[in-house]
Image (spheres, rainbow, N blue to C red):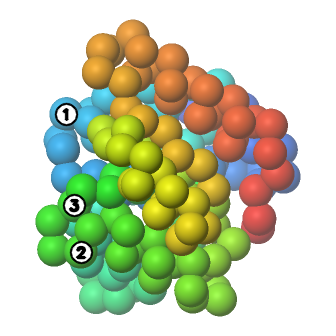
Amino acid sequence: MSVANAPGRALHGALHRPVQILHVEDSPSDVALTAAALSQGSVATELHVAKDGVEALAFLHRQGVYSDAPRPDLILLDLNLPKKDGRQVLADVKTDVNLRPIPVVILTSSAAPDDISKAYQLYANAYVTKPVGYDEFLLAMRQIEGTWLTLVALPR
């Protein structure tokens, strides 16, 4: 699934095109919230969704139906996924020399200290615990956008 936000939004300065985001998430409601938050943001994005870890890795390696998939500029990764969990996806991304530069923001419901520690040991770039309420979730997404799509320079 791919969702582009409304035209007229600013492009990421260094990229001169919409920011490509891979959201690895098995909850349709969380995907919808993320898409809604990004569509209200100030930076043009194109959101691609993988519903499990196997699909995410196929997208990243451009395998099968994803042979024409764009390279993501940012990955939003849930930890608790079917087939292959987010920890395994993160480990695969960060051990692959071609994928390693892509920033990975863990966006998950777990606030467990062990999960946070393990994610950073696997070289996650950030760890965000999903807020429960709609307004809080939108605020968290705005902060992710402000940091990862506005403030920092993304690799080309």
Q: Which residue is drawn at 63% across and 77% down?
A: 100
Q: Residue 3 carries which label?
A: none
Q: As drawn, is 24 to the left or to the right of 70?
A: left
Q: Distance between the residues labelled 1 and 2?
A: 20 Å
Looking at the image, residue 154 lies above or below residue 133: below
Identify the mark at residue 84; answer none if there is no mark: 2
Q: Nearer the viewer, residue 81 or 33?
A: 81
Residue 148 x %, y %: 68, 43
Point out the image quarter for the C terminus. bottom right
Contact check, label 1 and label 2, Cβ < 8 Å:
no
Mark 1 secondary-structure assignment: helix
Instruction: Please provide percent x and percent y for residue 150.
Output: 75, 36
Quadrant holding the N terminus: bottom left
Work out whether 35 lies above or below 104.
Answer: above
Q: Which residue is drawn at 82% across and 51% down?
A: 153
- Residue 22, located in which quarter of the rendered image? bottom left
Q: Residues within 10 Å of mark 3 (few under 14, many from 20)?
A: many
Q: Is mark 3 on a helix, strand or loop?
A: loop
- In the rendered image, which residue does mark 1 sit on? 29
Q: In which quarter of the image is residue 62?
A: bottom left
Q: Are marks 3 and 2 in contact (CB under 8 Å)?
A: yes
In depth, the one of 85 and 16 nearer the eye is 85
What x and y, as percent, mark residue 51?
22, 59
| Disc 3 versus disc 1: nearer the observer | 3
Q: Considering depth in this image, is 125 or 116 the residue closer to the camera? A: 116
Could you tell which of marks 1 and 2 lies nearer the N-terminus?
Answer: 1
Q: Which amino acid does label 3 sit on?
A: Leu
